[in-house]
Amino acid sequence: MPAPQTLTLRRPDDWHLHLRDGAMLADVVPHTAARFARAIIMPNLKPPVTTVDQATAYRERILAAVPADVDFTPLMTLYLTDNTSAGEVTRAKDSGIVFGVKLYPAGATTHSDAGVTDVRHTYKALEAMQTAGLPLLVHGEATDPAVDVFDREAVFIEQTLIPLLKDFPELKVVFEHITTADAVALVREAGDQVGATVTPQHILMNRNALFQGGIRPHHYCLPVLKRERHRKAIMDVLAEGHPRFFLGTDSAPHPKGAKESACGCAGIYSAHGAIELYAEAFEQAGALAHLEAFASLNGPRFYGLPVNEDRITLVKQDWEVPGEYPLGGETVVPLRAGEKIGWRLG
Ligand code: DOR
Ligand code: ZN
């Protein structure tokens, strides 16, 4: 039997990750640290990470959960509010541990109630970010409840993102977890000012996965999965090797019971097999040659950081994902629970 196909990549980074806090950290950090050298850590804790002091303390708690035999660097972010001051932005840049500021429109998603009620309230902070060269990381969904849930990204682009890019032409913006052809077009046209992260779920699944034989709470995330034509538009731009799209899992663990509920939380856990899942998606699209740039080169270039020097190896071999992983005394149901992933870490 011939040896299975292998793929060696410069070690990747995850440019959008939820690690949570407390007892959950010890369960989720090792999954990410086994694959990625660095990750941009989302600040939507309760209470949110709004100051450099909070980010510094959170960073220490994350580092304490990194296994002794691996190197992993958390890249911290601040949670933008209507009250974020220009001074806090400058302190963030000077700290050397904060790499972005996250915009959650208030009410858009998990723990976003402290988010921004009107982008105009944040203009002082955005000005300071533009001056300091600190990127704005955007959850791009309109929050008006009258807007159809599948149209929220497209409406956000028109109503909020395009005006914001005009008002701050030097501000670097990461359009996080894009889900639509509209977002792909915006990023293509915006030029070097805008990059985008792409999750594994938004290139492996379309919205049918939410209703496959019944309602599937573990496929529910925000922005919600979209139609096939949108999934294809995202995969097509990645298969082209476009340099401003990069890996950001949005891995977002919630306890099983909080997902399998009458009002289930948004979030898909993918840290246990993230780079393997992307390898599957790129392979299906005949685009494995572009996986390394997406996973390991485009993100550092956009953030102005060095690339990683070590390598990982992926082996084309099925493995079965457990039904659950421990999560701080409870459990999380991972993406592909009880099913196979076609690539494994070497
Ligand atoms: O599905 C999501 N889960 N989308 C988000 O924007 C937040 C995340 C979470 O924190 O659970
Ligand atoms: Zn997220």
Image (cartoon, grey):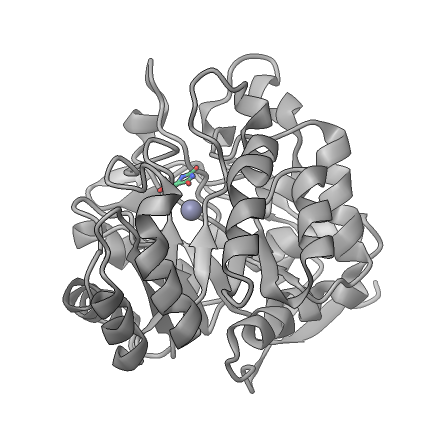
Q: Residue 116 location in percent, x, y?
A: 32, 42
Q: Note whether residue 248 is visible.
A: no
The extreme front residue here reads: 167
Left or right: 207 as drawn, with respect to 286: left
Q: Horizontal placement of 320 versus 327: left or right?
A: right
Report how many numbered discs are placed on residues in the image: 0
Residue 343 lies left or right of residue 332; in this view the side is right
Question: In the picture, residue 92 is in which quadrant?
Answer: bottom left
Q: In which quadrant of the rendered image does the C terminus lie? A: bottom right
Report the residue at 27% width, 74% height from top.
90
Residue 113, image x and y in percent? Answer: 26, 35
Quadrant, the N terminus: bottom right
What x and y, as percent, mark residue 22?
A: 17, 53
Name which residue lies at 70% across and 27% down.
227
Query: Where 70 sits versus 27, above or below?
Result: below
Which residue is at a point 38% across and 44% down the rendered structure image? 119
Query: What is the quadrant of residue 255 in the picture?
Result: top left
Q: Nearer the viewer, residue 49 or 18?
A: 49
Q: Quadrant of residue 39?
A: bottom left
Residue at coordinates 26% horizontally, 79% vertically from top-left? 95
In the image, is residue 217 above or below residue 11? above
* Residue 10, horizontal then vertical, whole percent: 62, 78
Figure check: 334 above or below 98: above
Q: Viewer-proximal residue, 206 or 126?
A: 126
Asked whether residue 148 is in view, the answer is: yes
